[in-house]
Image: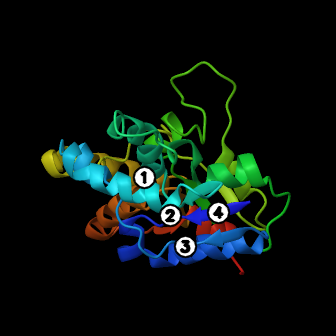
């Protein structure tokens, strides 16, 4: 099984420790992992802003770099979802999109493909889980609260493999935090208030940390928390899953 490690641009630039933790965890589990050094942004910001023509060359480059891997794994639900659901439309009429169905978020990949029964580290803290919108409603990492289905949560399943961690969830557990990329730029006040409300609900759980599968959501909430001087820390879920490596 050949794994292509996709590290989104904002993870590479702002949260490189998340990329390192992803690599360490995957290799610890005995997987053959390669990081294509010429990878770039997947094109999500351009396409979401209406500039699909600017995203197309990036999709083509991504296809070239990652098409020969069995799986493409990334520590980002939003970027993974963009590749899976938007690339086929971007590349339609040019050639078949090879990478879309190979792209998986690291949580999804671990839970559904690798299926570990134990993880090596310890994280003796209470953490409040943030269910990112793309993860819930596009990648199926947890059950959407608006659907009348049996509840599930792949992130909690994996966190329970880490010794010492206590997982809690906030009220309105899968409500958006207000990041939303272009939304946070065009509707700044609404975005900031949504972020503040979300962080306060996480704090109300008594957690020491907020964790989740997407650095973009965590970055947004951390910015709100720092500006409001709110007492909570932030950590990507893969850093907990790889604790001790």
Mark 1 or 3, which is nearer the eye?
A: 3
Please give the residue where the numbered disc 4 appears in the rendered image. Answer: 3
- For disc 3, the marked residue is 35
Left/right placement of residue 74 relative to residue 89 reads right
Residue at the image point whose x is 28% and y is 49% from the top? 56
Residue 74 visible? The answer is: yes
* C-alpha separation, residue under disc 2 versus residue under disc 3: 7 Å
Q: CA distance from mark 4 to mark 2?
A: 9 Å
Task: State how far apart marks 2 and 1 are (Cα).
Answer: 9 Å
Q: Quick one: label 4 or label 1, which is nearer the N terminus? A: 4
**Residue 21 percent across, percent down from the top left:** 60, 74
Disc 1 marks which residue? 79
Image point (54%, 73%), residue name? 35
Quarter of the image that includes the C terminus = bottom right
Q: Quadrant of residue 153?
A: top right
Mark 2 — residue? 6
Colour mapping used in the image: rainbow
| Mark 4 / mark 3, whichever is N-terminal | 4
């Amino acid at each position: 099984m050949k794994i292509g490690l996709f590290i989104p641009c904002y993870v590479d630039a702002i949260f490189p420790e998340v990329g390192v933790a992803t690599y360490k965890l995957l290799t610890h589990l005995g997987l053959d992992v390669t990081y294509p050094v010429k990878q770039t942004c997947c094109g999500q910001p351009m396409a979401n802003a209406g500039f699909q023509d600017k995203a197309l060359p990036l999709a083509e480059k991504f296809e070239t770099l990652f098409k020969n891997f069995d799986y493409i794994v990334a520590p980002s639900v939003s970027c993974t979802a963009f590749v899976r659901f938007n690339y086929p439309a971007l590349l339609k009429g040019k050639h078949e999109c090879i990478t879309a169905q190979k792209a998986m978020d690291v949580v999804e990949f671990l839970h559904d493909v690798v299926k570990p029964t134990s993880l090596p580290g310890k994280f003796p803290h209470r953490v409040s889980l943030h269910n990112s919108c793309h993860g819930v409603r596009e990648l199926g990492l947890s059950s959407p609260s608006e659907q009348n289905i049996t509840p599930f949560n792949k992130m909690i399943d994996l966190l329970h493999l880490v010794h010492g961690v206590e997982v809690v969830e906030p009220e309105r557990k899968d409500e958006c935090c207000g990041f939303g990329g272009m939304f946070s730029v065009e509707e700044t006040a609404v975005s900031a208030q949504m972020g503040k409300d979300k962080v306060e609900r996480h704090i109300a759980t008594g957690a020491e940390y907020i964790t989740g599968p997407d650095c973009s959501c965590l970055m947004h909430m951390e910015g709100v928390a720092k500006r409001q001087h709110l007492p909570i820390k932030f950590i990507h879920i893969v850093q907990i899953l790889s604790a001790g490596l």
